[in-house]
Image (cartoon, helix red, strand yellow):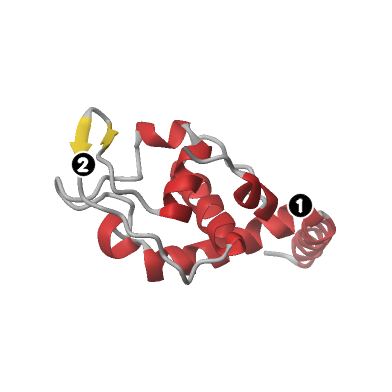
Amino acid sequence: MNYFSKNNFLVILVAWGGWACSNPEAIKHEQFVIAGAELYAKHCSNCHGVEGQGLGKLYPPIKGSDFLKNKNKVICIIKNGSSVPVTVNGIIYDGKMLKNKNLYDLDIAQITTFIYDRWGEDQSTVETEQVTNVKCE
């Protein structure tokens, strides 16, 4: 790269970095994704897999899951656990998911943001208030 090209590259890099750093929503989203990835690895990946692939017929996949179409239901299951069978991609899973009492609403918002950013169609940030106020059946 010649001197002129290096300078142009640096100007573009600084300009882009300045824009990215000045967008609070983008920064918050990335923070939630990073924190959510760590929480997912700690609390979810043993059953649902590192890549969201699930575990055979015991635990459903998250990646490619039609279950992700209902974000409130996903939040409710992470928040409250589930003792009833769930159908994912036409397969019934009746493994229980216990409530994790160590997860706060912020943690659940971060995990959900990570899941949808990584494997879902709706890549918006899940707000803590959405988790707090979600209506579960």
Instruction: Describe the element under mark 2 as helix, strand or loop.
Output: strand
Residue carrying label 2:
93
Quadrant of the image for the N terminus?
Answer: bottom right
Residue 82, compared with residue 106, is above or below; it is above
Horizontal side of residue 11 vs 89, given as left or right: right
- Front residue of 116/133: it is 133
- Front residue of 105/109: it is 105
Q: Picture coordinates of residue 125 (x, y %)?
A: 64, 48
Crowding near the residue tagged with mark 1, few <14, some 14–19, many ≥20 C-alpha atoms within 10 Å = few
Crowding near the residue tagged with mark 2, few <14, some 14–19, many ≥20 C-alpha atoms within 10 Å = some
Alpha carbons under labels 1 and 2: distance apart = 36 Å
- Front residue of 27/109: it is 109
Q: Picture coordinates of residue 19 (x, y %)?
A: 82, 55
Residue in view at x 17 percent, y 50 percent? 58
Q: Picture coordinates of residue 120 (x, y %)?
A: 47, 40
- The numbered mark, 1 or 2, whose residue comes first in the sequence reads 1
Instruction: Describe the element under mark 1 as helix, strand or loop.
Output: helix
* Disc number for residue 25: 1
